[in-house]
Image (cartoon, rainbow, N blue to C red):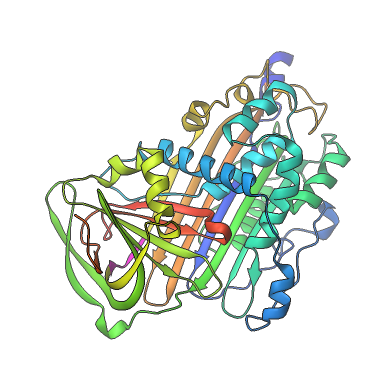
Amino acid sequence: MSNAQRAGRKAHNLIWYGAAFAVIAAILCSYLFAGNVNSDHIIAKPKYPGKIGFNDFEERLKRREEIDEEFIDNLKKFSFNSASMILKEEDSKTNALYSPMSLYMALAMMAESAQGSTQEEILKAISMNDMDMIREQTGKLFRKLYFYNEIGRLNLANSLWLNKDIEFNKSFLDKMAADYYAHSFSVDFDDKYTSRKISEWVSEHTGGKLGTDPDDFPIDSEQVMTLLNTVYFYDEWVDSFNADKTAKDTFHLEDGNTISCDFMNMTRGSHRFVGADGYIASGLSFKNGGSMVFILPDEGISSMDMVSDPAILSEAVNSLFSEKCQFGKVIFKIPKFNYKAELDLRKSVESLGIKSVFEAGTADFTPLSETKPIFVSEIKQSAAISIDEKGCEATAFTKIDYVGAARPDGTAEMILDRPFIFAITGADACPLFIGVINNPAA
């Protein structure tokens, strides 16, 4: 192999994973690392916020941080623009799931590792003005979204897996630990057991739903770094469904066929809903805050057409927090679902304007390492979600490979027996997940 070829592969599989996860049953995970990761390998590690009891309202109030409104607006703009671009490409016969929070965290860290025009492209794509805003506000966002108590948990975790033979900028690693809560591990990419270590870390920080197969994390001797981001979420409905009222019924597919599935049923009085031209929206709240918004397009309107327009998607998801919202009786009939989705995000990221990161001759990741060249080969996200009478479970990980070289009146019927859209939101209504259910039995 020539020197040029080796340079072209130098940072092969410098990977960035983002995982976002919502679980039904409380699964307690270590904050540090999977059990098989030796602590001697840790180069830098963050200090996580301590746990707060669900009923310790005073302490929870002390933890609340005000986040810059411009940052939140920019984050939402990126979330809906990227969701529309990504989800519109999905097959209308299958279910789709995307975590904008996971991709944001991955791209924010990528921006931190870049400089010059490479960094500028990333900042523009995620609708952010500068790195100072990202560093300060992303840390605040982490702490505001974060909760860990006997009811549920929402945590973002990041890690960098570094080739032990490559010199990385220590100041960069320290910054990642301080501002992005990222662990840094030194590993041997000649040792196949490293794949298992990475796999175990992802599995642990996604409640065991993702990362269970080491083959999903291939390594080779030319690999420079693997970066992972996880978002773990577990919470229960404020108003749980009565399992005795769950019953089989018919769901109408986009192609005119029907399938039978279990529907959860509940009626709420004086509940929020929006009846707008083209859709009905309502939502269910979680005990630790946040909510799951359900959007049912009118008959004859495709859910895929709705998500393809970022303005309409943003309006629909945010409608329950706007002046359009009204209160009345809401009849919920929601199918139980449980599915996984795989997304190849490279083309979507390029469409957002991030292009130079994929080019060996122009990508500039000098803040990360003086090793040249380093560039990105692919960006992928895997996701999974399920809901039942008690709560919601969702998970996603984003993988970035770096390489070298009719309106209701007073009553809303959320009868979700045809394709619909949903969003899970956290603090300040920030979208954690956005998805489309085309076939709940799939």
Identify the image quadrant of the N terminus: top right
Task: Check the image and name the residue furthest to the front.
Answer: 323
Q: Quadrant of residue 89?
A: top left
Residue, far left:
256
Prevailing secondary structure class for the magenta stretch in the rendered image: strand
Q: Which residues are magenta?
A: 334-338
Between 172 and 134, the residue placed more toward the observer is: 134
Q: Position of residue 143 (x, y in %)?
A: 70, 61
- Whether residue 178 sits left or right of residue 332 in the image: it is right
Q: Can residue 130 be spotted in the picture?
A: yes
| Residue at 44% over, 53% down | 318
**Tally of marks:** 0
Relative image position of residue 438 (x, y in whole percent): 27, 52
Residue occupying image coordinates x 21% and y 45%: 301
Residue 6 appears in view: no
Q: Report x, y in % for residue 79.
A: 51, 44
What residue is at 76 percent from the left and 42 percent from the top?
162
Q: Is residue 155 above or below residue 51?
A: above
Q: Quadrant of the C terminus?
A: bottom left
Quarter of the view holding residue 33: bottom right
**Residue occupying image coordinates x 54% and y 36%:** 379
Does 46 sit left or right of 141 as displayed?
A: right
Locate residue 40, reporting x and y percent. Answer: 85, 56
Q: 214 left or right of 374?
A: left
- Examine the structure image and report whether residue 144 is included in the region drawn in magenta: no
Front position in the image: 187 or 128: 128
Front in this rendered view, residue 17 or 241: 241
